[in-house]
Amino acid sequence: MDYIRVIQEVVDVHKEIMPTGVTRRVMEECQKAYNESPELYKLTWTVVDSHAHVEHVEDEEDIANVKLSHKTQTLIVEAVNEVPDHPIHRKPIVMSAQDMPNYGMIHKSWLEIPMPRVMYMGEDSMRIFHSIVPYEPRKRRRDTDA
């Protein structure tokens, strides 16, 4: 949204030589664009899944073999007020709040939850939410070779 701030600064600098109506209209449109921009956050979480199977050993007791797998991800998500309908299953099935990050969004109430937080997803899966922080987009510097 830096580009909107640049436009506002240019208008502020040159407002004396611009017609009042044009200045007001440009500032209103900039404010509208700024207000309509989504609230983006950087979500870091780890998804831990388990898998268990029984190994049959001849002449001994069966052994339960449990394996855990985990994946840590950082996602850019939009904070929304309402849980939307599921994009695959359609109405009347509403998306679960725990599924929302997979579709680029979180419920605004999650911003109030202390982190880290563990949410269990049935018997064989859990999600560990490490942090939810405001997303600050930064442009990468390009290498300038002469």
Image (spheres, rainbow, N blue to C red):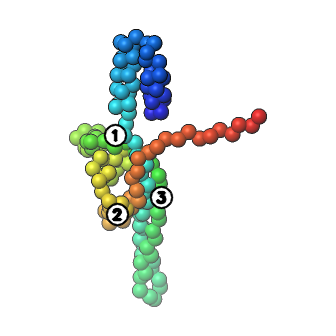
Q: Is the residue under label 3 in contact with that under label 2 (CB below 8 Å)?
A: no
Rendering coords of residue 101 (x, y %): 38, 48
Left/right placement of residue 94 relative to residue 42 reads: left
Q: Residue furthest left?
A: 92
Looking at this view, is 96 or 33 the one in front?
Answer: 33
Residue matched to label 3: 72
Q: Secondary structure at mark 2?
A: strand
Q: Secondary structure at mark 3?
A: strand
Which amino acid type corresponds to the residue marked 2 in the rendered image? Val
Give me the disc on residue 10.
none
Per the model, the C-alpha gap separating discs 2 and 3 is 13 Å
Q: Which mark is drawn over residue 87?
A: 1
Residue at x 43%, y 17% (from the top left corner)? 15
Q: Which picture quadrant has residue 16?
A: top left
Amino acid, disc 3: Thr
Name the residue tied to disc 2. Answer: 118
Q: Who comes first in sequence, dot 2 or dot 3?
A: 3
